[in-house]
Amino acid sequence: MTDTFATTRPESNVHAHPSPYDRLIAAAQALPVSTCAVAHPCDETSLGAAVEAHRLGLLKPILVGPQHRIREVAEQCGYDLTALPIVDAPHSHAAAAAAVAQVRSGAASLLMKGSLHTDELMHEVVARDTGLRTARRISHVFIMDVPTYPEPLFITDAAINIFPDLATKADIIRNVIELHHGLGLGTPRVAILSAVEQVMPAIPGTLEAAALCKMADRGQITGGVLDGPLALDNAISPDAARVKGIVSPVAGRAQVLVVPDLEAGNMLAKNLTFLANAEAAGVVLGARVPIVLTSRADSARSRLASCAVAAIYANHLARTAPLI
């Protein structure tokens, strides 16, 4: 688990298509508001994200952390906390545990990271007896708003699983497929990325990609259309797929990119952000509730989009069978 998922978007905001973030925020605003436990919101960015999400009707935050520090930050930044309950906790570790406890008790249906390290929060999330574990492996998904791509581009996993094995990759794919459905985006086209589009024993990721596709054929992974291995170019470019002679419902028009490991995913997300003027909203899946991971480096709009994604998915989980 790592904090290296954080990205910063360049100043330009030119889009070749309507922003999916605007649609996600509007969709979340139309739903019943979910209560979110915010762990240790003790800086301007994390507290501001919670306050703004509340103002826009995306979340009902419960602020969990040292009460005096939270009120200090609010006073310095001019945030009105009148309508926001505070659960006092002496330090960040206690705040993480108390925020998770709010979810376990049913007081909150979402969890949000404040100004503490991701590892500190996730340690409490995965605690065997007191956490939010399910039978699934936990994974992270970036929902990228790429101005030059016609629809949201999901990238997974670039923040939690460093070197996922085959079983973990299967859960990573199950998690992102369910998110795609839960956001109302339908059956996703899932590209399992490697350096090449052929199965090559010298590149283990190509073997795992082929195995994952066969798992989908056999009903072990459902709800999405999988293809792989695919190189990045022939996953997202119809021209590249055509030149390579790849005939596939996924090649050239992928909606989900499954990366071979965390480093590849992190580099891909940051390349899109810095070189293609993209934004990166993010959510952690596979726990009992969605988890919002905000960062000081995120733009205000991507933080709100992360909240919107988590709120929509939490509402979806409440209407369907929850993960256990």
Image (cartoon, rainbow, N blue to C red):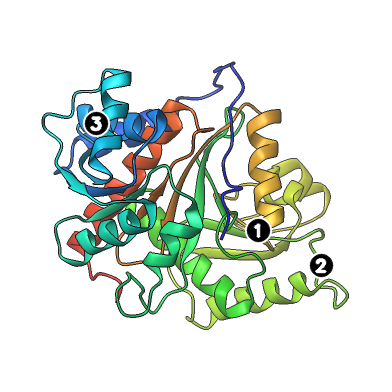
Give the labeled residue for mark 1: 262
Q: Quadrant of residue 41?
A: top left
Earlier sequence position, callout 3 versus callout 2? 3
Q: Up-down: is 22 above or below 107?
A: above
At numbered mark 2, what does the secondary structure look like: helix, strand or loop? loop
Residue at 34% from the left image edge and 32% from the top image edge: 49
Question: Horizontal and vertical percent for residue 234?
Answer: 74, 50
Whether 26 is drawn above or below 319: the answer is above
Quarter of the image where the C terminus is located? bottom left
- Label 1, label 2: how far apart the Cα atoms are: 22 Å
Residue type at tag 3: Arg
Q: Amino acid at mark 2?
A: Gln
Q: Is residue 187 visible?
A: no
At label 3, counting other C-alpha atoms closer than 10 Å, the crowd grade (few under 14, some 14-19, many 20 or more) is: some
Q: Closer to us: mark 3 or mark 2?
A: 3
Q: Residue furthest left?
A: 83
Residue designated by label 2: 198
Say the numbered circle drawn on residue 71. 3
Which of the pair 195/139 is nearer the observer?
139
Q: Position of residue 266 (x, y in %)?
A: 65, 49
Question: In this rendering, would 86 be left or right of 124?
Answer: left
Q: Nearer the viewer, residue 106 or 272?
A: 106
Left or right of 193: which side holds 137? left
Q: Nearer the viewer, residue 173 or 57?
A: 57
Q: How many marks are shown on the rendered structure?
A: 3
